[in-house]
Image (cartoon, grey):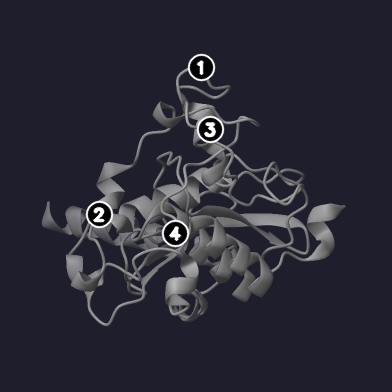
């Protein structure tokens, strides 16, 4: 009996290794690349418009498989623990609801999913894969051994921090960033994507027109003029986003 169990275990391990290897081959970035660019983007500090907190970042490929999970601090506890899974949700959302010809950031979805919005209920449509989210020892979280890698995390998140990734105008996956205000999350994700040279966005609903940038058009009654608006997180949100657009401009692809 024990020999049969050992054989089954060996087969299961081989399948898991092959699955992770196949996922890795289709990933747009490596763990090292994500880590480096995420740290660089977070280091912009007050220019991101948040609380200058440490961040989590996750990248998924076009199939929704997690490619890499990283954090910017020197130790695991320096980032909000809950933001690891949120960053993965954001990556999943931006990938799941973007197309080769139209990018939607998680920030673009905020108003659309509110009661009366055009996508109301979307946030309930794809539940998180809980077994994958909390698998394995915490010491591996945010490292190149993170158990999320090669797994489909699922989940839908509808505030700033998730952006689709385009390589030469080809949709190759998405990035999710979490750990600060949602506006700062968006700005840090924007800088990180730019650093990875994966921001060749074909079209979108954001500002400037044709981008997937955050839209601050919600009035005092809570209504978004265009239907894709996101709340202003603090007084510096708009200024910080304008700075990001200057320092990390989109390639001309977004205006095609």
In the depicted view, which residue is nearer to us: 155 or 244?
Answer: 244
Residue behind mark 2: 82
Residue behind mark 4: 185
Which of marks 2 and 4 precedes in the sequence?
2
Residue behind mark 3: 219
In the depicted view, which residue is nearer to us: 52 or 72?
Answer: 52
Q: Position of residue 91 (x, y in %)?
A: 48, 52
Near mark 4 (Cα within 10 A), the count class, few <14, some 14-19 or many ≥20, is many
Residue 212, above or below 139: above
Residue 234 seen in render:
yes
**Circle 4/circle 3 CB separation < 8 Å:** no
Which of marks 2 and 1 precedes in the sequence?
2
Q: Residue at x 64, y 74 (%)?
A: 247
CA–CA distance in space, label 2 to label 3? 30 Å
Q: Nearer the viewer, mark 1 or mark 2?
A: 1
Residue 196 seen in render:
no
Q: Residue at x 57, y 44 (%)?
A: 216
Which of marks 1 and 4 precedes in the sequence?
1
């Amino acid at each position: 009996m024990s020999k049969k169990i050992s054989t089954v275990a060996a087969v299961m391990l081989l399948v898991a290794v092959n699955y992770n290897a196949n996922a890795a081959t289709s990933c747009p970035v490596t763990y090292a690349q994500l880590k480096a660019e995420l740290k660089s983007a977070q280091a912009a500090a007050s220019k991101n418009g948040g609380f200058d907190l440490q961040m989590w970042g996750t990248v998924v490929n076009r199939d929704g498989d997690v490619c890499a999970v990283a954090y910017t601090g020197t130790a695991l506890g320096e980032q909000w623990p809950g933001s690891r899974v949120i960053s993965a949700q954001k990556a999943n959302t931006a990938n799941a609801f973007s197309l080769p010809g139209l990018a939607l950031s998680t920030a673009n979805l905020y108003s659309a999913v509110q009661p009366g919005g055009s996508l109301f209920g979307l946030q309930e449509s794809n539940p998180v894969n809980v077994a994958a989210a909390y698998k394995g020892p915490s010491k591996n979280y945010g490292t190149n051994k993170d158990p999320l890698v090669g797994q489909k995390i699922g989940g839908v998140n509808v505030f700033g921090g998730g952006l689709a990734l385009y390589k030469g105008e080809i949709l190759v996956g998405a990035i999710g960033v979490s750990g600060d205000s949602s506006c700062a999350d968006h700005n840090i994700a924007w800088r990180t994507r730019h650093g990875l040279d994966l921001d060749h966005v074909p079209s979108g609903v954001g500002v400037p027109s044709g981008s997937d940038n955050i839209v601050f058009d919600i009035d005092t009654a809570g209504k978004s003029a265009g239907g894709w608006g996101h709340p202003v997180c603090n007084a510096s949100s708009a200024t910080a986003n304008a700075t990001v657009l200057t320092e990390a401009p989109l390639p001309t692809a977004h205006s095609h």
